[in-house]
Image: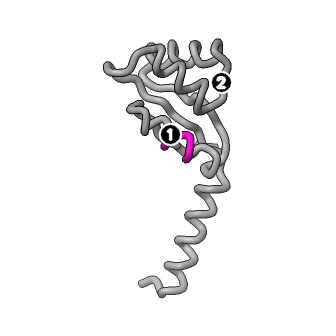
Amino acid sequence: MKTLSQNIFQEETDTDTLTGAGCSLIVWNDEVNTFEWVIDTLVEVCGHSLQQAEQCAIIIDAKGKYAVKEGSYETLKPQCDAITDRGINATVEVVAN
């Protein structure tokens, strides 16, 4: 059985691993949002160029999802929230090493 101090240490370690690890911002394909809406969102929220956003949208449509940006959890989480607030499915995932 774990003691209270072991549980606290494990939670802190898990949090440090998640926030310190490299993460990807994944945008998922759907049948609702238009290419234009996804492209505009990537330009405005992620700072992509128009060409970069267009390429991401094409890949999202073809493959069902795409990692549109990589970085720390702290950087990507607000961007993920802004994308989902626009009705586009997005998640932040830890990159496996």
Residue 26 in percent (x, y) is at 51, 33
Per the image, the residue denoted by label 2 is 48
Taking the spot 60% from the left edge, 49% from the top edge, the residue there is: 73
- Which SS does the magenta portion mostly show? helix
Q: Quadrant of residue 79?
A: top right
Q: Is residue 54 above or below residue 19?
A: above
Near mark 2 (Cα within 10 A), the count class, few <14, some 14-19 or many ≥20, is some
- Of 62 and 41, the residue lying toward us: 41
- Mark before the other along the chain sequence, 1 or 2: 2
Residue 61 in percent (x, y) is at 44, 15
Taking the spot 56% from the left edge, 46% from the top edge, the residue there is: 78
Q: Is 78 left or right of 72, judged from the image as shown?
A: left
Residue at mark 1 to residue at mark 2: CA–CA distance: 15 Å
What kind of element bears circle 2?
A: loop
The residue stretch that appears in magenta:
77-81
Q: Is 88 left or right of 18, judged from the image as shown?
A: left
Per the image, the residue denoted by label 1 is 82
Pick the quarter of the image with the C terminus. Answer: top right
Q: What is the three-letter code of the residue carrying label 1?
A: Ala
Asked if the residue at tag 2 contacts the one at tag 1, i.e. Cβ–Cβ closer than 8 Å, the answer is: no
In reply to whether residue 1 is colored magenta, the answer given is: no
Residue 51 in percent (x, y) is at 64, 12
Q: What is the three-letter code of the residue carrying label 2?
A: His
Near mark 1 (Cα within 10 A), the count class, few <14, some 14-19 or many ≥20, is some
Q: Is residue 96 above or below residue 41?
A: below
Q: Quadrant of residue 86?
A: top left
